[in-house]
């Protein structure tokens, strides 16, 4: 493996980790912390400020993740074409990546729309109703991105295991027992 390949793979995993970790922190910590604000407007401002600060980093992570994924696919094109389990995992990973991008984009769009609706909710009944609908939508969307990106991390581990050579310590204990029986 070349230094370039290692750099691309590390970029791919680290950017997914940032995408996963940022979305998980938002769902588990930032959004609940923002709910401690005094009123709907303050709560929206707190969440908006946190996501506004994280947004460029998350966007860069997603972009670099996609680019490094394309580079890895190009580097492994023969393996993908010739090895069915790898091809299946790559197809699944591509679909899951697409889903993660779509869910992230929809959460961003819905979050911005929710912030606008919450600002007008006190004086506008239709905005109040829209804010309720968007709040319910966001309660589901905020967990979809960490779930999808966690799946990507699992698939990366699976694909890495496929490239491994000799069995290691974490292989099933039954292999060890079989070896010991053959010796004894």
Image (cartoon, rainbow, N blue to C red):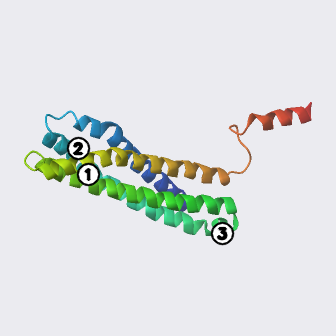
Residue behind mark 2: 47
Q: Secondary structure at mark 1?
A: helix
Closer to the eye: label 2 or 1: 1
Q: Earlier in the sequence, mark 2 or mark 1?
A: 2
Closer to the eye: label 1 or 3: 1
Q: Secondary structure at mark 3?
A: helix
Residue at (35% x, 37% y) in the render? 28
Circles 2 and 1 in contact, beta carbons < 8 Å: yes
Residue 16 in the image: x percent, y percent? Answer: 45, 52
Residue behind mark 3: 81
* Residue 84 appearing in the image: yes
Above or below: residue 145 compared with residue 43: below
Above or below: residue 103 compared with residue 171: below
Residue behind mark 1: 111
Distance Cα–Cα, label 2 vs label 3: 45 Å
Dot 2, crowdedness within 10 Å: few (<14), some or many (≥20)? many
User: Tag count in the figure?
Assistant: 3
Residue 134 in the image: x percent, y percent? Answer: 26, 50
Q: Based on the displayed image, in which of its 4 quarters is residue 87 positioned? A: bottom right
Q: Secondary structure at mark 2?
A: helix
Dot 3, crowdedness within 10 Å: few (<14), some or many (≥20)? few
Distance Cα–Cα, label 2 vs label 1: 9 Å
81, 120: nearer the viewer: 120
């Amino acid at each position: 493996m070349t230094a370039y390949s290692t750099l691309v793979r590390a970029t791919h995993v680290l950017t997914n980790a940032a995408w996963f970790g940022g979305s998980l922190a938002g769902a588990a910590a930032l959004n609940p912390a923002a709910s401690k604000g005094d009123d709907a407007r303050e709560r929206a401002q707190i969440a908006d400020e946190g996501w506004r600060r994280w947004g460029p980093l998350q966007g860069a992570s997603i972009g670099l993740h996609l680019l490094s994924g394309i580079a890895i696919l190009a580097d492994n094109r023969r393996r993908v074409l010739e090895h069915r389990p790898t091809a299946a995992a790559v197809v699944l990973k591509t679909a899951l990546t697409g889903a993660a991008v779509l869910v992230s984009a929809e959460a961003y769009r819905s979050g911005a729309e929710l912030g606008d609706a919450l600002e007008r909710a006190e004086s506008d009944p239709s905005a109040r109703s829209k804010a309720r609908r968007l709040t319910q939508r966001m309660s589901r969307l905020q967990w979809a991105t960490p779930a999808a990106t966690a799946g990507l991390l699992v698939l990366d581990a699976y694909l890495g295991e496929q490239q491994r050579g000799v069995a290691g310590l974490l292989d099933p204990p039954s292999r060890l027992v079989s070896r010991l029986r053959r010796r004894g």
